[in-house]
Amino acid sequence: MKLWQKDYKLNKEIEKFTVGNDFLLDKNLVKYDVYGSIAHALMLNKIGILTENEFQKLKKALIDILKLDEKNKFEIKLEDEDVHTAIENYLTKKLGSIGKKIHTARSRNEQVLVDLRLYSKEKLHEVQKLALELANSLIDVAEKHKDMPMPGYTHSRKAMPSSVGLYFGSFAEALIDDLEVIEEAYELNDQSPLGSGAGYGLPLNVDRHLVADLLGFEKVQNNVLYVQNSRGKFESVIIFALSTVMHDLAKLSNDFILFSMDEFGFFKLQDEFCTGSSIMPQKKNPDVFELTRAKAAKLDSNLYLVKSVISKLQSGYNRDLQLTKEPLIESFDITISTLKIFNLAIKNLQINKGKCIEACTSDLFATEHAYELVKKGVPFRDAYKEIAKNIGKLKKRIGATGDLELGKAKEHIKAITAEIDLEIKKFNSKIKDLLK
């Protein structure tokens, strides 16, 4: 039975077209639909729609679904359309009329919203933890090589003295900033949509604050029509936040590819991170980093897709919104897998000190020499011209790149980690209490 089933059968081709990939994608959402259903059933019990006995039977059956899902044995068929129908059909088959009561005072519209928001809460936590781990790894490399010279580039040409520490520290701080963007997306997502029905409220006095609290949401999303209008909007904000991480990883990838070329040789990628050529025996290719650049572009396309879908819709639920689910799930999968790969890569990256020093040719110190003339009273513009005429005569000097303040970045990461760990603990505690 479909949740909307009436006295006719849907054409099979129409069924395939309208269901799309949802019955496959929703394998990601089973546990979240169970959480939402238990909270909803408890609320129905509190307002007198379900007896205590009926609630306990529903809760037990829903926890059984969780156990089946953990073993990958809970099936969602194309005929079910989605996880919501598959779960209700399971409950009805097992509990008869009691199972039919679970959908009282809710719509599929708000079910998919609560599933995606709970899913996004956990996935955003995972992204935050992985990004912090990578930032820590980058700072460790920066600290280890803070005094190792390396050319700095502008316009893809040698510019001024830099260091390996400055280089890796820059990406650590980039990720710390990315975490600020992710936190904004997390706070927006942390609103309970339950009790909004199909976007116009419900004819029962449901307790929206109770279900929000049971599921660990920070607050209730108040306006029931905006609940529906926010679908796709929240997803696009999350994808944008993820794309900021991927953009930094794409830039880092581009540098790794360049600086590990034989012509530079600053960095060396271990063989186990490289693939080979089917025709050229000598090739060791940085495919991981090339694919990262392309995957960052994939997130941009996912963001454009979601924003394009929602920009053309009138208020209220529209079936177009179904197509915003896959880009969200895919964007999380890409970002999480890429962060994991980079955590491995950074810990196994080799720095070639000889190549880095060799590349620090005398022209890199032109600006420094110009300022030495300035200190003697020469106007900067005259000093600039004087040094420009005598670049070939400058002596090579390995200069420091200043205080990187890596300790401050470490403390910042420590503080953010503590905040995120507290959020995760609070959410896990709510879910644990719900399943007791």
Image (cartoon, grey):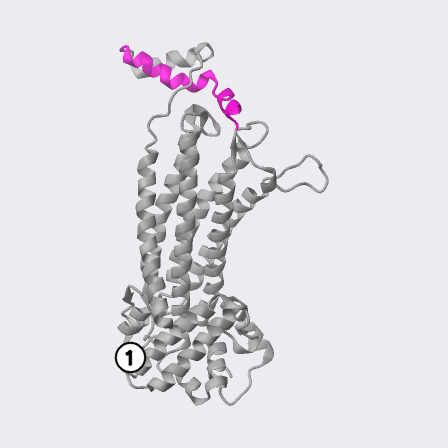
Give SS at disc 1.
loop
Q: Residues within 10 Å of mark 1 (few under 14, many from 20)?
A: many
Residue at 41% from the left image edge and 36% from the top image edge = 140
Q: Give the camera-side residue of 144 and 149.
A: 144
Residue at 38% from the left image edge and 75% from the top image edge = 38
Q: Give the camera-side residue of 206 and 327.
A: 206
Q: Which residue is mark 1?
A: 206
Q: Examine the rendering and report whether any part of residue 401 can be seen.
A: yes
Q: Main secondary structure of the magenta part?
A: helix
Q: Position of residue 92 (x, y in %)?
A: 47, 85
Q: Amino acid at mark 1?
A: Val
Instruction: Please provide the residue range marked out in magenta.
Output: 352-377
Whether 380 is drawn above or below 117: the answer is: above
Q: Locate residue 278: give its quadrant.
A: top right
Q: Position of residue 361 (x, y in %)?
A: 48, 18
Residue at 48% from the left image edge and 78% from the top image edge = 85
